[in-house]
Amino acid sequence: MTRPALRPAVSDPTPAPSPSTVPLTRFMLYAPDTAENAATIAARRALMSRKGVAVDEMNQRARLRREQASRLRRVRWPQLVLASALVAGIGTAWWGSQQQSQAVLLGGYAMAGVAVVALIARIARQPALSRRPLEHDYLPDEHLATADDIALLRRLAQADKEIEIAIAAWWRDANPIRKGDVRLALDVQRAKLG
């Protein structure tokens, strides 16, 4: 097996384009710019690394937040005070019965009755917290973007080509655009404006 002989290089009659005709930085999304500051770079990095979150995952996070909050407010001092008043009312009624004092007996029953009604009213209000929509337990950036937010995002994309390139995939993503995503685009614009 023989190798073909190497041919001498033939000079190309067309001149090579000078570096000033087509700057490479025009096509690079992460092109370094000497005028950029750390805030611009951080805002761009956050915009580029945005990850869409599915509705089910967001609901699961909100449900966990609701459960943690309900654990914190499960036993509060009003319930403890009302339960103590109930026990004290029953104890007073029993003591009035033992002392054969009708006034103390009726006072104990009245205190126990008021405590029971207040305790039932207090407990009956709490399930309303678990029946409310999960959107109430979203963080501010986790809420779905409104029509105004989407219009703002489109205006930002039209004004800045870099934002348009970064959010192009968001429109095709199955995960919804959230207020936090709009905030990321606004942060890039604010950082560029200085």
Image (cartoon, grey):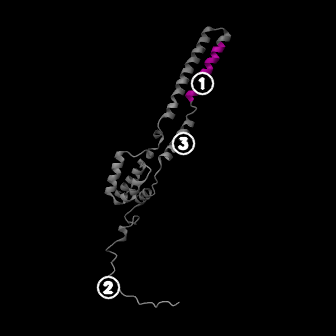
Pointer 3 or 1: first along the chain: 3
Question: What's the amino acid at mark 3?
Answer: Leu
Neighbour tally class for label 3: few under 14, some 14-19, many 20 plus, Cα within 10 Å: few
In front of the other: 91 or 155: 155
Q: Which residues are magenta?
A: 77-95
Quadrant where the C terminus is found in the figure: bottom left
Residue under label 3, please give it.
64
Residue 112, percent from left and from top: 59, 18
Looking at the image, residue 54 sits to the left or right of residue 167; the answer is right
Residue 87 inside the magenta-drawn segment: yes
Seen at 40% across and 88% down, the residue is 9
CB under 8 Å between callouts 2 and 3? no
Residue under label 1, please give it.
83
**Secondary-structure class at tag 1:** helix
Looking at the image, residue 155 sits to the left or right of residue 109; the answer is left
Question: What's the amino acid at mark 1?
Answer: Ala
Seen at 37% across and 67% down, the residue is 27
Question: What's the amino acid at mark 2?
Answer: Pro
Residue 184 inside the magenta-drawn segment: no
**Secondary-structure class at tag 2:** loop
- Compute the Cα span from label 1 to label 2: 98 Å
Residue under label 2, please give it.
13
